[in-house]
Amino acid sequence: MNALLRTRAVEKPWGIVALPPPFTAPNGKRIGEIWFEPPPELPQLLVKYIFTSEALSVQVHPSDAQTEAAGLGRRGKEECWTIVHAEPGARLGIGFTRPVSTEQIRAAALDGSIERLMRWYPVAPGDFFYIPANTVHAIGAGIGLIEVQQNSDLTYRLYDYGRPRALHLDDGMRVASGEPYDERCRVELPATGAVELVRGPKFRLSRLSGAPDAQLAARYRGPLLVIPLDEPLRVDGVRIDPGGCGLAPQIASIEATEASAWLAAHPCL
């Protein structure tokens, strides 16, 4: 078992040319995402860092049930975001300010007014948002975040600010919810302590502080992904630095200092 996951830099039109340490971008390339290759032990989850200089498209993801019903297999996508950097005025668009119909979403996507229908949240480091499938959403400019998601690449773009990329309005309208965002999915992380951020249905995610104790060991059984936020930790003696992601065979194999904060993720089987 390789504790340290390999990374892959993904170029995006809205990415940045100067990545924060420990990442580096090829000269002149706009890197928007750093992917950690899912290990064979946990193929269901994908962890990314996302860095934005421009707004991402307004988009939506289907659920597993919807992709299976469409004959696409289990390719639904639920995801969540932990904000690690935010420039002044940075924001996320999630859901709508009021209930809207499918016809209203389509019309607003076509004429560009969908931004005005959406609810926009100003963000700062330590903010957390869970994005269930069917939630219309967009990441704004000037943000760095950690994304934990179902390992799926199925995205339906509804609006893309005039960029020359394909839109998927018919598919998107079949799955998009026109409801406001459920505020219970939003968390402002405390400075320290254990906080369960996502509890299913597809994966669990917690922000933890310090070394795992017996109570955590009882909750987390089997392999998990660990993401240090501010200080290194070790998995079976292998050092995982902030900016990295590691695979732990079990939570007892993780060593962390009292001052360290880290994320722990594993799928719901």
Image (tube, rainbow, N blue to C red):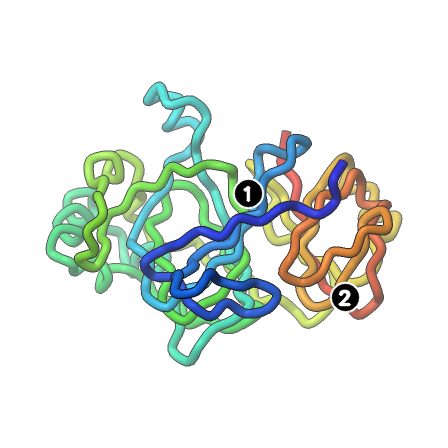
Q: Nearer the viewer, residue 259 or 28?
A: 28
At 71% from the left edge and 41% from the top edge, which residue is drawn?
Answer: 224
Residue at which label 1 appears = 46
At 38% from the left edge and 60% from the top edge, which residue is drawn?
Answer: 139
Q: Nearer the viewer, residue 5 or 260?
A: 5
Extreme-right residue of the structure: 214
At 71% from the left edge and 61% from the top edge, which residue is drawn?
Answer: 241
At 34% from the left edge and 61% from the top edge, which residue is drawn?
Answer: 14
Give the residue type at disc 2. Ser
Identify the secondary structure beneath mark 1.
Answer: strand
Image quadrant occupied by the C terminus? top right
Q: Which mark is residue 107?
A: none
Question: Residue 185: in sight, yes or no?
Answer: no
Q: Quadrant of residue 11?
A: bottom left
Q: Position of residue 175 (x, y in %)?
A: 31, 37
Characterize the local packing of mark 2: few (<14), some (14-19) or many (20 or more) Cα atoms within 10 angstroms.
Answer: some
Q: Position of residue 262 (x, y in %)?
A: 70, 59
Identify the secondary structure beneath mark 2.
Answer: loop
Above or below, comparing residue 32 to residue 258 in the picture? above
Give the residue type at disc 1. Leu
Residue at which label 2 appears = 260
> In this image, 196 relative to 122: left or right?
right
